[in-house]
Image (spheres, rainbow, N blue to C red):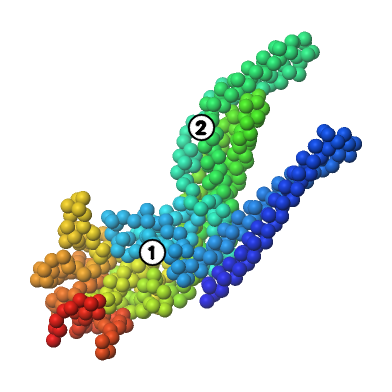
Amino acid sequence: MEARATYERGRDQRSREAALLEGRARAIGTTRLVLAVVALASIGAVVWGRLGPWVWWMLAADLVAFLAMVVVHSRVHHAKERASAALRFHQRGLARLDHAWDALPSTSQRFQSVDHPFVADLDVFGRGSLMQLVDATETRFGEERLAKLLSLEDPGVGVWPDDVVARQEAVRDLATRPVFREALATAGGVLADEKPDPAPLLAWAEKEGGLAPATRLLAWGLPLVTLAVIVLGSVVGLRPGVVALVVVVQIAIGIAVGVRLTPMLSASSARESSATRWRSMIAAIEVERFEAPLLRKIQQRLSAGKRKASEEIAALERIVGFVDARRNEVFRLVIGPLLMWDVHCASALLGWRSRAGVNVRGWLDALGEVEALASLAGFAFENPAFAWPELAAAPVLDAHSLGHPLLPADRRVGNDVRLPVAGRALVVTGSNMSGKSTLLRALGVNAVLAFAGAPVCAASMRIGAARVATSMRIEDSLEEGVSHFYAELRRLKRVLDWAKEKGRPPVLFLLDEILHGTNSRERVLGACAVVRELVGFGALGAVSTHDLGITALERELGGQVENVHLEEQVEGEAMTFDYVLRPGIVQSSNALRLMRAVGIAVPDDG
């Protein structure tokens, strides 16, 4: 309720601010139009009305007022953009609370990979995914950092438990700072609807090279010579034609040199649209007084150079402001060449690059890391009932009231799941639609959240280091000539290969409807062989199946395998599900009943 109240209060306040600023912007626009009409009328009065000098004073006052309105209009427009970005922060928070997927950005499909050990099976990316539920990033590198955390591809995920503990502390710290998270999202939200790509900036910043000394000398020498000719020409008796020729030659040389520098200078405007607008996000991080050690280390990375990152980016912004003077045609074709403006701007840009370019990647990495952690912190803030997992030294997964975070709270059912040591497995049986697949996905998704440093959808959870590997959604390939069954075999082989690797954390395997592409006899034999081998190599996990023959493993392996089940409840012709996990083997099936429910005529099995 605290999160919802915070977002609703913020939404209402920012909505009022945006509406007020919109009205103010319209009023200023109308005032500018009136001032422009007055200016035109004043000019007409001077030309045709032959009025006194007071009209000139009125025209001057009108122009000053018009320029002031331009400045004020720009500031009001910027304030309105910030209010709109802040409003979007609160609206998206409410959408996440309501699981309103259509109201949330869904740009993470590009991270999907059929070759990844689990992301496709566990709905990590795409619409209605874990990423969509968590993501509050406003930059591409923040989104990519979060994607790495949720796919367990970040290098720190494998360091147990220090790096995970550090992220937990950082996420806890940020969860208590909704004002900072709003400020960070607001600063990034005014960038654009699409997250800018940092690749062009990084390519330019990390490139080597500079201007030739002769070019620098020319940039200072030529304007001075031209100025001297203009000023001293009449004194020494130079003809006006000679002075004009010197000026024309100066302009021609300036234009020719500028043409060579145009690609770099034109690209600077693209860099300005991303890099300089990230300055306010970085500045927000620099001034926040964090308590978590990881966040303090990130702040230190933003001060790696002689000046803070925000100060260096502000310097780049000023240089780009001078570059943008080229957009005026008169300046670009006359004034700029006379001053060798392009060379001076290029020199300033290259000087900035030689001084600060090497630090840009580190700055953007730091910003992306804070954004990713802030997204996880928002998830923690929005789900205060979720537990912070205890990180164990030994392989274990012990969860109380474990649920699936992608299900709304009113539809979510929690179950106790216990894999106390390595080399343990659950065989989950159950009727159709009873929740077997959801249970396996809940195990996997919560393990991912725990390793990323976030809270988990459970009353409590104790988990040790593990590598998540799944085989659930199997797709055949006509193009590659791979059948569904063979595709599943390849997935299972990869899980087994992972389990055999020595010196690595054990595999947490989740296998749904294992080997259902073959006949019942071969399925039971094959599935039993896979589970025996997995637990023999110290893996832990769960297997769901309709084949009760696999449940014989509990008796065969003496405690390494435990049978559990989910079932339907039948009252008359009505069939319901409570999704409660129970010990033992399921004693009922509902396939024929479901067939009859959809209108398929089948004989009574009794």
**Left or right: where does residue 447 sit relative to residue 290?**
left
Q: Which residue position holds label 2?
A: 263
In the displayed image of the protein, which residue is found farthest to the right? 52
Residue type at mark 2 is: Pro
Residue 461 shows in the view: no
* Above or below, 442 relative to 605: above
**Quarter-wise, where is residue 555 in the image?**
bottom left
* Above or below, 222 relative to 129: above
Q: Where is residue 563 shown, x and y percent of the image?
A: 21, 79
Query: Regarding mark 1 in the picture, which secondary structure is present there?
Result: loop
The crowding category of the residue bearing disc 1, from other C-alpha atoms within 10 Å (few below 14, some 14 to 19, many at least 20), is many
Q: The C terminus is located in which quarter?
A: bottom left
Q: Residue at x 15, y 84 (%)?
A: 604
The crowding category of the residue bearing disc 2, from other C-alpha atoms within 10 Å (few below 14, some 14 to 19, many at least 20), is few
Q: Residue at x 64, y 65 (%)?
A: 16
Query: Regarding mark 2 in the picture, which secondary structure is present there?
Result: helix
**Left or right: where does residue 36 sit relative to residue 316?**
right
State the separation of the CA atoms marked 2 and 1.
Answer: 41 Å
In the displayed image of the protein, which residue is found farthest to the bottom? 572
In the displayed image of the protein, which residue is found farthest to the front? 48
How many marks overall? 2
Q: Earlier in the sequence, mark 2 or mark 1?
A: 1
**Quarter-wise, where is residue 462 in the image?**
bottom left
Q: Where is residue 76 shown, x and y percent of the image?
A: 67, 54
**Left or right: where does residue 497 sit relative to residue 122?**
left
Q: Which residue position holds label 1?
A: 129
Q: Nearer the viewer, residue 143 or 314?
A: 143
